[in-house]
Image: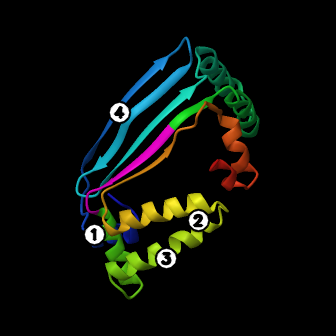
Amino acid sequence: VLEDPQAAQTMAALGYESLTGDITANGVWDSASGNMGFENFVLSVDDAAAIGLDFALGGYTVELVEAMQQINATAENDQAAGMAMLGLMQQLEIQGAAIKITDASLTNKLLEFFGQQQGTNADGMRAFAKGMLPLGLAQLQSHEFAAKATAAGGSFLDNPGTLVIEAQPAQSIPVMQLAAPLMSGNPAALID
């Protein structure tokens, strides 16, 4: 049940009067080493799409969990708790991550829906979206990445199937090393 009438109208226009699906996940945590991973964490909505997530972390130890619980139990304000959590996050490391989108009709429905709003059809909206990809990605100031992402995104829009966004670093990367470019407003540094 959607309380927002506009959201309900949009869902109906897309052909989704009701949604069904499932969530599956496989995970492992080695509390001694702190290695943790999820494989095939998938949210699947019938006749729409499935979004999957795989990731591997290092440093997620029992001591870290206990320290996080202690902060939550004793923090006097949200800002102090947030700063303390950031300090703890320094021991976490990203070993790899992937997001997988598998289309089951949603992409073309969205292209048709937004195309109609713009006075065109799915093909016109597809061409527009493909034209916007290089412009949006140019802001990251990585020509090689922009070219790869534009090609993959354009291919997906032409023939919706599966799109995978993956990070497989040669060695583990501290979470704070990834967070710093985001906090400093330099997301382009994440690419390398």
Q: Mark 2–mark 4 contact, CB under 8 Å?
A: no
Viewer-proximal residue, 155 or 6? Answer: 155
Q: Quadrant of the N terminus?
A: bottom left
- Of badges 4 and 3, the one in the foreground is 3
The label on residue 25 is: 4
Residue ID for mark 1: 12
Q: Tell which residue pokes out farthest to the bottom in this image.
A: 119
Task: Please report the residue visible at 70 percent of the width from the left and 37 percent of the height from the top.
Answer: 176
Region of the chain picked out in magenta, as a range:
97-105
- Of badges 1 and 2, the one in the foreground is 2
Task: Please report the residue visible at 38 percent of the width from the left and 62 percent of the height from the top.
Answer: 3
On the image, the x and y values in percent for residue 93 come to 62, 30
Dominant secondary structure of the residues highlighted in magenta in the image: strand
Task: Please report the residue visible at 42 percent of the width from the left and 41 percent of the height from the top.
Answer: 53
**Inter-mark Cα distance, 3 to 1:** 28 Å
**Inter-mark Cα distance, 4 to 3:** 36 Å
> What SS does tag 2 mark?
helix
